[in-house]
Image: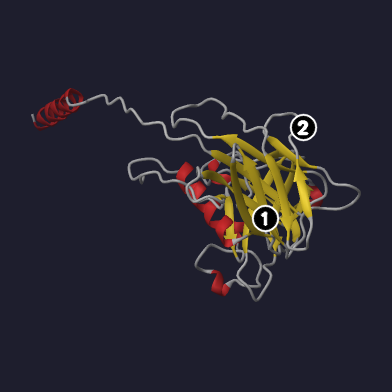
Amino acid sequence: MQRYFILLFLLVGVLGLNSCTTVIDAKLDTGPIQLSVDGTLTDQPGSQTIRLTQTAAYFDSSTPPVATSATVTVSDNAGKTYSFTDPDNDGYYVWQPTGKDTLGHIGRTYQLTIAYQGETYQASSKMNRVPPVDSLIFVKRKLNPLSKREGYRADFYAIDIPNEVDYYRIRFFRNGELQNKPGDIITSQDGAFRGVSTVTDGLTFIAPIRRSINPDSLYVLNDVVKVEVQSLTLEAFDFWQELRTQITNGGLFATPSVNLPTNIINTSASGRKATGFFITSAVRSRSAIVAPPNLRASEN
């Protein structure tokens, strides 16, 4: 009899919840179209690219319209100016090097200037230092303690540069493909997490950061793995952290979405605002194959 009343209570509760369901068709006002900037310049050889698009309505899932016919230049505090052109008229503005010159140099500050549709936008970023990646190894592991399936976990080793607070972004590639799920946005302060770097300055990156370069399925034999450590400014570090928070923000305890920070500023206070971020990064990387020479019985 007790079980009967419990089942009856649950049934009434479910029916009550269903009867209270209301479908809300949210109608959001469409804001003004803004310029969106996606630009990360590095100290690596080869061409450099800045992508310009225009913003679209919140629920518009189509490819953002490109921003063409802009004038894009980057200048540094050493007196050099670099012109970016859009040869394919697709919103990808490219600088091509001449000879062996590279655009990025550690310690220099770079200013981006964009003239678009009668507006002028600017952004500034310093290219900070970055440590080398000393090694990349693999350790055989189960997918989880209850699984019979096994794979190989990657650990990379790098030592934070001492005596200053340094900010980094870590990227990793599997067989040449960038791993770019929301959880793959990895940032670090002095080789650790924000707030604990006072005890990690100048030391080896901590284990959770070293092991953050693994896909959910782990690696298999003969996979080619590449890890990159990129230097960031504090502002760029905050941008990547907020981006990860926003795109992983869901579930019962999700917080209201907010606009991401931007360093793209209209030179006219009354002009249209822009979105996106201009970043300069020094990059150090290492690649390794999941093969016997790189396998270890443990990470120590």
Q: For the residue carrying disc 1, how many other residues have a C-alpha within 10 Å: few (<14), some (14-19), or many (20+)?
A: some
Can residue 150 be seen at all in this image of the molecule? no
> Mark 1 highlights which residue?
111
Residue that appears at 51% across and 47% down: 243
> Is residue 33 toward the left or the right of residue 218 in the image?
left
Tell me the quarter of the image containing the C terminus.
bottom right
- Drawn side of residue 129 relative to residue 14, left or right: right
- Where is residue 143? Give x, y as percent: 57, 43
Q: Earlier in the sequence, mark 2 or mark 1?
A: 2
Residue 225: x and y, percent?
Answer: 73, 45
Q: Which mark is residue 201?
A: none
Compared to 105, does 277 lie above or below? above
Element under disc 2: loop
Name the one closer to the observer, 295 or 239. 239
Q: Is residue 228 above or below residue 27?
A: below
Q: CA distance from mark 2 to mark 1?
A: 22 Å
Q: Which image quadrant for residue 109?
A: bottom right
Category of crowding for the residue at label 2, using alpha-carbon neighbours closer than 10 angstroms: few (below 14), some (14–19), many (at least 20): few
User: Toward the viewer: 3 or 20?
Assistant: 20
Q: Position of residue 19 (x, y in %)?
A: 17, 23
Q: How many marks?
A: 2
Write down the residue under mark 2. Answer: 87
Q: Horizontal placement of 11 versus 273: left or right?
A: left
Instruction: Name the residue furthest bottom.
Output: 163
Name the kind of residue labelled 2 in the image: Pro
Query: Which picture quadrant has residue 39?
Result: top right
Dot 1: what SS? Answer: strand
The type of residue carrying mark 1 is: Gln
